[in-house]
Amino acid sequence: MHPELFGSCRVLKVIASGPLTEVYLAEQQPLQRQVAIKALKSSISPSSPFAFTLAREAEILSSLRHDNIPRLLEFVRTDTAMWIAMELCDGFSLREVLDAAKRIEPHAAVAIAVGIARALAHIHDRGIIHCDICSTNVLLSRSGDVMLVDFGSAQAENLPSSPEPVDGQTALGSPAYMSPEQILGEPIDARSDLFSLGILLHEMLAGKRPFDDEDQRTAAHRVRHDEAAALGPELHVPRALSQVAATCLRKLPSDRYGSAAEARAALDEVASNLGAPPRKHAIASLLARARLIDRAPAALDREQPDAPALQPPRASILGATRMLLAMLGLIVGGGALIHFAFRSDIEASAAVGRGPLELNPAQPGYLRVLARPWAHVVIDGQQVETTPFAKPIPLAAGVHHVTLRHPNAPDERRVVRLAAGERVVLDVTMNVRTVSRPDASAPLPPPSSPTP
């Protein structure tokens, strides 16, 4: 039975449970905002040496302010309980996303890895090593944010170490994601976290960790003695991205990137060469493809001033031109041109009015969209994808109105007719204004963070 209240915070549900602590979703009164509570289990006394781990985590979080790390809101210690209240990341762990999506396409994997690298650069600059970078400790919000959580195993230059585990009941860190030097108990530095980042990046791209195997050896043994599995050509991973993962995964720390900032710069260069969409879009679209959210939030488009709003077709320069042509046609040709000019807009509006687009019909046709450099894919008035993506979109047989949108290019509209089982490829080059091309490598401005 979990507590109903932590101070002014009313518990709504348990999010996670570990050997020493439990994490709750709670509502903070009277602000009525949702927060995450990490509390000592009732079986652990606040005077226990293991309570020190949570107090230490609170002290570490209090020294950090970054949009890829949840903010500490409160730390409370009483005679009978201890807890911290943190900013809530409304979304999913990377583990949940991998379980749902199996593999993550390069542009989304890069977006997630950049978020982790940004958080690591921030903590490393402050003398903190996370020591537990793994898929359960990376959260992805519904709006496309990346959060690095759980600093319970972290090392900090100005703080004493956490107590050692007792009787093997728990471990500090996740062995399958540990660096060779961490497994051996040798002194570690920031480059140990980069090895763990390399494992995560490989896992996102390949669908499994680079040292996973079916033999009887432990993951820790394979990390120490085996070379990391290669990202094969069948995965269609850009060579430059494979090299980033391989550099992070080198056995000797001196052979890896020298810092998280250096790793991030390499990832930014890959993103730029991929022509990837903005990071938040890439991540939110990933969640939509994994069926974890209904669709990428349309509000994300407002982050790009030139992006058209995601709504049914409306008046535009093209529409005005059509109207002039239609009026001329009315005078010259008795209105035949009116029907031609407005038919596609009328059909598109009718399609929007049919209700939610069915993306998993019983006998679908399949639409594959190729758009250079990238585009939001809107079908029958609803955004369903952001290119590039590998899997074709299953659609009900019939006529569909497809709009490709890029913040710095005119919309490209197509009408596609699909039969059940038919596969159609739509290949379009967007007429992008190069001078205004969005820089996918530049960080999106956080709501209120002074950090780079």
Image: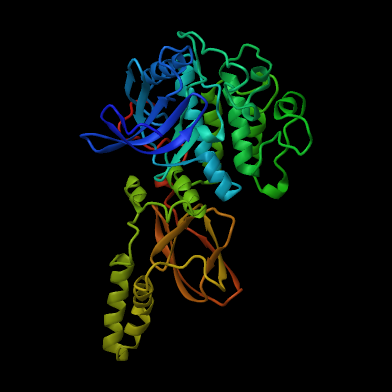
Image quarter of the N terminus:
top left
Question: Residue visible at 34% across and 77% down?
Answer: 346
Q: As displayed, is residue 207 above or below residue 148?
A: below
- Residue in the foreground of this view, choosing between 199 and 334: 199
Q: Is residue 206 above or below residue 419?
A: above
Residue 78 spot, x, y in % from top left: 32, 16
Which image quadrant is residue 240 in? top right
Of residues 131 and 171, the one nearer the viewer is 171
Q: Is residue 289 above or below residue 398?
A: above
Total numbered badges shown on the rendered structure? 0
Q: Nearer the viewer, residue 106 or 374?
A: 106
Q: Position of residue 125 (x, y in %)?
A: 46, 17
Please give the name of the residue rendered at 67% of the width and 48% of the height, measured from the top-left corner. Answer: 235
The x and y percentages for residue 154 are 51, 19
Residue 268 seen in the current view: no
Residue in the image at 48% along x and 13% along y: 127
Residue 220 visible from this viewpoint: yes
State the quadrant of the C terminus: top left
Q: How are the residues colored?
A: rainbow
Q: Give how far across and how far down residue 35 sits, in percent.
A: 33, 34
- Residue toward you, 150 or 378: 150
> Looking at this rendering, what residue extends furthest in the bottom direction?
334
